[in-house]
Amino acid sequence: MIPTSDMFKKIKSIFIVEDPAAEKAAAEAASSPQVTGTTSSPEVSSRAVDTSGAAPDPKFTDLLLKAIESNNKEGFDYLEYKNSVRSLEGVIPEETMRFKSAFEMAKTMGLDKEKLIQSASYYLNVLSSEEKKFNDALQNQKAKQVESRSEQMAAMEKGIADKQAMIQKLTAEIEESRKLLDSTKGEIEQALVKIENTKGLFVASYNLVFGQISADIEKIKSNI
């Protein structure tokens, strides 16, 4: 087992690949379909994570590697085997030979192919567990920051729609009142014209009669 004091650094050193070509190969291997051989292994999540082109975040990488560290099993297993493969990079250029050479050494530690695959699958399950924790936390944040605000947005949209309906109603009422106002103005103008006409008729009759009486008074004064 990897010494406790250097465990995280050791695990990080065997997983963090600085060589771009190696990173590309690891990404392609992760995204390619897995071929099941005759050796059985525990069932693990095969769902691929869509990164949408995002680069790995050091914070999350450390989080996942710490989970592997805290779940590191006693004895020689996949982690120690991977460390052996990594340590042979400077000695054996060809990857297949590194895997085979490291496995020959692993067999002397009591590790066979089935146990190796089972232990690697165990760490996949550790990562799947961390993914579930992350997704649960993400869902909680979504509920707090997105869904609740979506409800607020729905309420605001309803409020806007209600106010728009009220505006439309008031606009219709204003238009109706404006028509009534114009109609009333017309009626007033017609009434004023009628009143003025009536006044003119009255004044004409008044002047006719008043003039005759006034004239008769003058005649009486002068003739009697």
Image (spheres, rainbow, N blue to C red):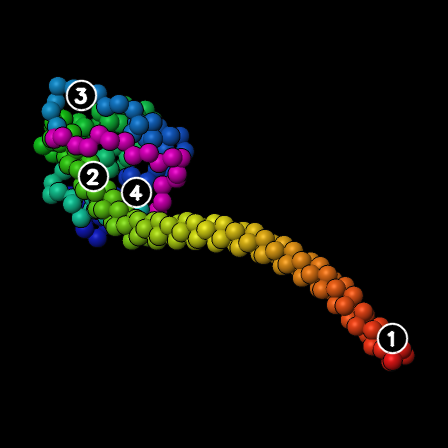
Q: Is residue 144 left or right of residue 128?
A: right
User: Disc 3 vs disc 1: Cβ atoms closer than 8 Å?
Assistant: no
The amino acid type, in three-letter code, at marker 2 is Ser
The amino acid type, in three-letter code, at marker 4 is Ser
User: Disc 4 vs disc 2: Cβ atoms closer than 8 Å?
Assistant: no
Examine the residues drawn in magenta and state their main secondary structure: loop
Query: How many angstroms separate mark 2 from mark 1 (CA)?
Result: 130 Å
Query: For the residues carrying marks 4 and 2, which lies nearer the camera in this image?
Result: 2
Query: How many angstroms separate mark 3 from mark 1 (CA)?
Result: 142 Å
In the image, residue 177 lies at what x, y percent?
53, 55
Evaluate whether residue 65 shows in this view: no
Vertical arrangement, residue 1 with respect to residue 48, above or below: below
User: Disc 3 vs disc 4: Cβ atoms closer than 8 Å?
Assistant: no
Q: Nearer the viewer, residue 43 or 72?
A: 43
Earlier in the chain: of badge 2 and badge 1, it is 2
The amino acid type, in three-letter code, at marker 3 is Thr
- Magenta residue span: 42-59
Image quadrant assignment for residue 182 = bottom right
Is 13 a magenta residue?
no
Count of numbered marks: 4
The amino acid type, in three-letter code, at marker 1 is Lys
Q: Which residue is mark 3?
A: 36
User: Disc 2 vs disc 1: Cβ atoms closer than 8 Å?
Assistant: no
On the rendered image, what quadrant is the N terminus found in? top left
